[in-house]
Structure formats: C-alpha cells, structure tokens
Amino acid sequence: MTEHFDGQEAWAAALRAHGRRVTKQRLAVLAAVERHPHSPAESILAAARAELPELTAQSVYVVLGDLTDLHMLRRFEPPHSPALYETRVGDNHHHAICVSCGRVEDVDCAVGHAPCLTPHWNPNAKPMTIQIADVMYQGICQDCQQAQQLPPHSPSQKKEK
Amino acid sequence: MTEHFDGQEAWAAALRAHGRRVTKQRLAVLAAVERHPHSPAESILAAARAELPELTAQSVYVVLGDLTDLHMLRRFEPPHSPALYETRVGDNHHHAICVSCGRVEDVDCAVGHAPCLTPHWNPNAKPMTIQIADVMYQGICQDCQQAQQLPPHSPSQKKEK
DNA sequence: CACTTATTATTACTAACTCACAATAAGGCT
DNA sequence: AGCCTTATTGTGAGTTAGTAATAATAAGTG
C-alpha cells in the first residue's frame, strides 16, 4: 500500500502551498480523480469511498469546487453531461467527446501550446482578457461509428421521423 | 409590425425544409432567439411570451431541443450556466465568456474557417470523427476588470480567505 | 371542411447541485 | 503530548434546469 505514498506527499505539499489543510478527504478525492480522469462527481465519490467509506457526496462537491478554484483540478462540462474533473492542469490540452457513448479523449493543443488564447475579436466586440480556452471537440468514436453502420435488426437510436 | 414578416417567411421555409410544421410557437421561439442571442431557455420563454403569452416552458424546451438537433439553432453550455442558444449556425464561430459577469461575445474562428476540426490525436488515443469544435474562451471583460481593480470600499465579490 | 397526426400543454418527476448550520479534526502553540 | 482555534466535513433541506408521460390542440393534407 506504500505505492502511492509519494503521490500523497505531492498532493499534501500542493495543498499546503495553497494554504489548505491536508485532510484525508481531500487526498482521497485527489487520488480518485487521478485514477479516474474525466469522471463526474458521483463517480469520484464512489471511487474515493473505496478508501474512505464515510465520505459524503456534499464533501466531494465542496472539495472539487475548491480545488478547481485553486487550479489543482480542472473541470469541464460537456453537453448533456454532468461536470467532469481531471488532475491534468497547466498544459491547456483539450477534449474530444463522443456524442454517442460519451467517451472522452484528451487532445493536445492543436496550434502550438497556447492555441486559442488570442482570439480574433470582431470589430465591434469588447475584448476580454482571456484566461483559458476550452476546446470541446464533438464527434463519433470508432466503436459507435461501426455500431451505427451495421444495419442488422438492432434497434438504432436514430430519431428519424 | 410588418418589419419581420420576411424573417417569419424565412424561418417558415426553413422549418418546412426540415419537415417540420410551421407553428406560431416555433416562430416565436426562433424570433426570440434571434433577438436575444446567447440566451438561456428561461429568457427565451420570457421573450417569446411577449408575442405569444400562452407559450409554456416545456414547449420551449421541446422546440429548442428539436431545432438544435436540426441545426437550425446552436446550443452551448458555458460553465456554471444553463444552456444558451443562438441562431448563428453553419459558420463555426466561438464564444468568449466573462467568468465574472457572464457576458458572452462571439469570436470568429481563430485558425482559418475550420480551425480545430483536425485535432492532434495522442499516439494511444482512438481518433474520433469530429463534427464540431466548440471553443470556449473564459476570461474577464473590461468592465469587470475595472470594477475589480478599483479598491474603493465596494463589497468586491472576490472570495479570498 | 373534415381528418390525421405532429405539436403543444399539463402534470409529475429527476439529476446535479447549492445552502445553512452543526459536528469534527488539522495544525499551531505551549 | 495535549489543548484550542477555526478550517473542513457532515447532515438535511432546498433549488435549478431539465426530462418523461400523456392529454389537448391545431397544421397541413385531401
């Protein structure tokens, strides 16, 4: 069980650096997010409870929200999905979501390493100071594509009138 | 009041082209979205009720969802905000959201006219067929920036411990 | 103008969070 | 090592945004 002690230490140090106390709840949440990237709060709760059964859902929401504000976690909200969390912060990588099955893949920045941080403002727009640029690719993953192309009598989800 | 009859006609034609009946509810919703871009369902309901008071919230949800599926409307979901709708479809422009006041600005595509439609897949990722790429810039608009820099005894929203 | 069925209204219901406050425990101090 | 302060977590209720099921209505066809 000593395998992730160094991880614990690293998280603890980061928490202290942000002026936060090192609690087992926060460590459990951070470990859960690290082990299950792109997971919603509910899944993180379930994963964290594996090592901390008395953890409550509300605590997870509080911790996730706070750590996200501190930029120790990154949150993104795909359409028709609850918010997802990941520990990869700092690099501004992006995400591709399969609109059919909801699978999420990380995507490195398309244009250099600060891709869309300098938007082309319209003439009449009031420019903002951009902090982050979330790029959300939406498409269909290979598995779902194959499943849809197969015509066999499987009840296809297509809503065609 | 004849000013937007041509608009009505255009919307009606588009609805017919998609095999949808032309109802006053749909026209009211489309007109409301056109007059109030980047608005949530609730605001669209309020705006549409100006010309169609008996319209219900659920109808607005149904109509917005259906028209979005038809790509007559575009929906995007900024963090901590309900889904927003707009009539600008086809061009893949992006959005900048002020994290402080929630204001939304349109942003033209940063890289040519199909900017991020070809993501750089990681070696071990399973590529998807990308349909759209939503780019969500998050930053602080000029107004909010000034409001935050002013130190005067105004109760600033900053949550600093 | 009647009729078929897409569309909308009504009502109930759910998911994903948020809020207020009481209970607990992390870390500084002695 | 133990106490104490207050950040953190737990408890329970409440809210927002949206979905689902079915009944009532009306668009468009013949």
Image (tube, coloured by chain):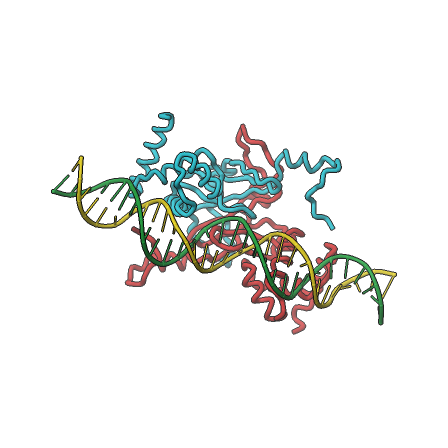
Chain colours: A cyan, B red, C green, D yellow
Q: Position of residue A122 (x, y in %)?
A: 52, 55
The quadrant in which the N terminus of chain B is found is bottom right
* Nearer-the-camera pick, A33 or B141: A33
Residue B151 image-quadrant placement: bottom left
* Residue A11 image offset from top left, x and y in percent: 35, 35
On the image, the x and y values in percent for residue C28 come to 20, 42
| Residue at image location 58% in from the left, 64% down from the top | B45
Counting labels gives 0
Q: Name the residue at 36% across, 40% down.
A: A25
Is B37 left or right of D10, judged from the image as shown?
Answer: right
Q: Nearer the viewer, residue A148 or B68?
A: A148
Q: Residue furthest bottom?
A: B1
Q: Residue at x 48, y 50 (%)?
A: B79
x, y percentage for residue B61?
A: 60, 58
Residue A97 in view (yes/no): yes
Q: Is residue A69 visible?
A: no
